[in-house]
Amino acid sequence: MTIRSARRSALTLSGIALGGALVLAAPLAASAHVHVHSDDAAAGATSRLEFSFSHGCDGAATTALVFDVPKGVDNVTPVVDASWKISRTLGANNVPTQVTYTAVTPIEDGLAASVSLDALFSSKVGGTDIAFPVTQKCVTGETAWTQIAKDGEDPET
């Protein structure tokens, strides 16, 4: 089991992968208040990913989470939840390139919430990091959790 955490300006969502087959990551804030969880992430397979958070943008309520689908992910299927409206930007072969979860009611800073999606990982990505860039939109402002630690950089700083 591998666990990844974040970097100062780019919070990397904690990712869990069994057997070292795949390491999940999502750039986010250094405070590491957003996490991704998966019990079965593996290359060549579909895995349910749950992204959770409990903070807004400098205290402002969260209105949406926008996920850019990274290379190495062949398809994603958003999981329906009554707390969120879901929209997708489709690319070639109707495969989503971006998924947006818009809160039915803005989620106050300090309350926990989550969204899920099923991701089909390419069989070519075994043993690699897959980062899910996320933009958190709020009543006031937004935070792009998109910066990723480069090779040799400490993801904790």
Image (tube, rainbow, N blue to C red):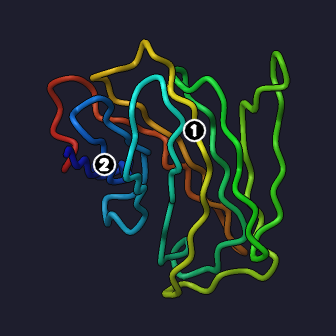
Please give left or right for residue 76 compared with residue 33 in the image.
Answer: right
Mark 1 lies on residue: 119
From the viewer's perspective, is 128 left or right of 44?
left
Label 1 is placed on what type of residue? Answer: Ala
Question: What residue is drawn where x is 61% and y is 63%?
Answer: 115
Residue 127 as seen in the image, left or right of residue 25: left
Image quadrant where residue 30 sits = bottom left
Q: Quadrant of residue 21?
A: top left
Farthest residue toward the top?
Answer: 124
Label 1 secondary element: strand
Residue 109 x, y percent position in the rendering: 54, 84
The Cα–Cα distance between marks 1 and 2, rounded to whole angstroms, is 14 Å
Image position, residue 1 (x, y; %) = 19, 46
- Residue 107 position, x and y percent, is 65, 81
Q: Which residue is mark 2?
A: 16
Amino acid type assigned to the residue bearing label 2 in the image? Ile
